[in-house]
Amino acid sequence: MYKYHCLNPISNVGLEYFPGKYENSESLEDSDVVLVRSANMHEMQLPKNVVAVARAGAGVNNIPLEDYAKEGVVVFNTPGANANGVKEMVIAGMLLASRDIVGGIEWLEKQEATDDIAKLAEKKKKQFAGCEISGKKLGIIGLGAIGVKVANAAVHLGMDVYGYDPFISVDAAWNLSRSIHHINDLNVIYKECDYITIHVPLLDSTKKMIGADEIAQMKDGVVLLNFARDLLVDEEALAEALKAGKVKKYVTDFANPLVASTPNTLVTPHLGASTEESEDNCAVMAVKELMDFVENGNIKHS
Ligand code: MLT
């Protein structure tokens, strides 16, 4: 009997893929394989008996990869499994940055529900006017599973899309709409685009990749979106740019005190992949990877 332990609640749809010879163990100490979503594994000791860890998600920055490699613990992730959920959040983020939907709803919620409310709303609506994303230039940094989906959706919404990725996979290139400008100079994105969205993993080489110099090159009034990882952006430089109006809006899925106290930010609590479908897809993929490893020794997405 193999024992698995879930460090975060993992979708039952996925866990049901484990056949009868697998048992859900209440304790980490007693498990052979581990499933994790966002728990910080840098802060915990992995028991010696654990042979593999599967992250139900794409990013693996919550896992001490080097330490585990030394101990022979295999780490899996689930690239692409939540890409659709994140894509929809990014599109929503662009729309929320462009139309004051939140402001309009919040204002209406504060009004008394009298017969005059429609008249009052008509008078007030000018204050919530926005702009359309159709016809605007979108720059996508990173054309992995999520970047490609965002690119294709944005083309369908009438945007002029520029994509940059020096390491694009054959799969991703194949799936990328032919209407996208696939460029090899990041500066084109900084200089030309009205909206810029980041879709790269957090590595030493990508940490703070958007800093004061990069922001200085961007168009005045650019909207920056970050549904990848907070440390990709130098948020102190960004806060200055937001205060100065250089960056019109920062839409991010990562809360921290600096971002929360800076004007013109739209912050969500890491909800990109929080859909039923994405959670199920990630869990199913993670469970299949673990089973294929313990039963057949196969290593995929490691
Ligand atoms: C990811 O890396 O894919 C996301 O952070 C997944 C999540 O929300 O847990």
Image: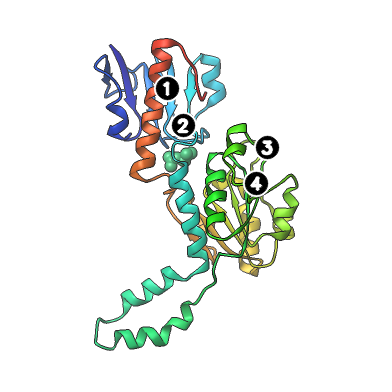
Q: Residue at x 55, y 47 (%)?
A: 230
**Are the residues at dot 1 and dot 2 in contact (C-beta closer than 8 Å)?**
yes
Quarter of the rendering containing residue 288: top left
| Residue 21 point in image, percent of width and height | 26, 14
Q: Residues within 10 Å of mark 4 (few under 14, many from 20)?
A: some
**Relative image position of residue 293 (x, y in whole percent):** 43, 15
* Way the structure is coloured: rainbow
100 to 90, vertically: above or below: below
Is residue 128 in view? yes
Q: Which residue is mark 2?
A: 78
- In front: 51, or 64? 51
Q: Seen in the image, is 262 located left or right of residue 297? A: right
Q: Earlier in the sequence, mark 2 or mark 4?
A: 2
Say which element carries label 1: helix
For discs 4 and 1, the disc positioned in front in the rendered view? 1
> Could you tell me which residue is drawn at 67 percent across and 35 percent down?
167
**Amino acid identity at mark 1:** Glu
| Marked residue nearer the N-terminal end (1 or 2) | 2
Q: Which mark is residue 289?
A: 1
Q: Amino acid at mark 3?
A: Ser
Please give the residue where the numbered disc 3 appears in the rendered image: 205
Q: Which residue is mark 4?
A: 208
Mark 2 vs mark 4, CA separation in Å: 24 Å
Between the residue at mark 3 and the residue at mark 2, the CA separation in whole angstroms equals: 22 Å
